[in-house]
Amino acid sequence: MKKFNLRSAGYQFAIAMLAVGLAGCASMGGGAAVNPAVGTWDTTVESPQGDLPMELVINADLTGTVNAGPPLDGSFAISEVVAEDGTLNFKVTLEFQGQELAAGIETTIDGDAISGTVATDFGDFPLAGNRKM
């Protein structure tokens, strides 16, 4: 007959509890903070042609798209994304009337609000919006 070893049982219990605790931490994201730029933003760009609505989608891996309403009507991939210290900057090439239009977008994020500038060869235009809830 095998003897029950209280010391061995105690170690096994401690290891089991440690494993449960670590699994709980991993399921909560391990404490990693989510970049405040990540999300979907409803924005408007003020241009000489009028207000241009744009939905900005920023993924956790800092890829994303600009989904533009009229007159651009399209989805455009963003590149060269830098999101740090409350700022979000990136480049995008839009298409308008068969022509490509390169833009550099620099923004500041304040909670669920975003504001900044869209810089193009035709000038700089203000951008403002809010995070979609």
Image: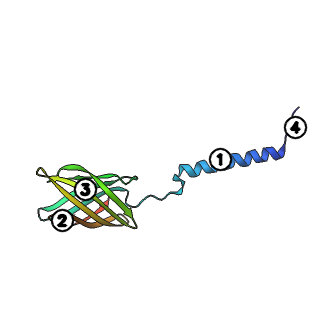
Residue under circle 1?
A: 19
The image quadrant that residue 117 belongs to is: bottom left
Instruction: Say few, some or many: other residues with alpha carbon within 10 Å of mark 1 (under 14 / 14 to 19 / 20 or more).
Output: few
In the picture of the structure, the residue carrying the numbered disc 4 is 3
Q: Position of residue 59 (x, y in %)?
A: 37, 52
* Residue 5 position by quadrant: top right
Mark 3 vs mark 4, foreground winner is 3
The three-letter code of the residue at mark 4 reads: Lys
User: Is there a contact, CB below 8 Å, between mark 1 and mark 3?
Assistant: no
Q: Quadrant of residue 44?
A: bottom left
Question: What's the residue at 20%, 54% (across, down)?
Answer: 94
Instruction: Give the structural element (helix, strand or loop) at label 1.
Output: helix
Residue at the spot of label 3 = 92
Give the CA separation, mark 3 to mark 4: 71 Å
Residue 22 in sight in this render: yes
Residue visible at 63% across and 51% down?
A: 21
Q: Position of residue 36 (x, y in %)?
A: 40, 61
| Separation (CA) of disc 4 from disc 2 | 80 Å
Disc number placed over residue 46 in the picture, else none: 2
* Amino acid beneath label 3: Val
User: Where is the C terminus found, in terms of image quarters?
Assistant: bottom left
- Whether residue 133 is visible to the viewer of this picture, yes or no, is no
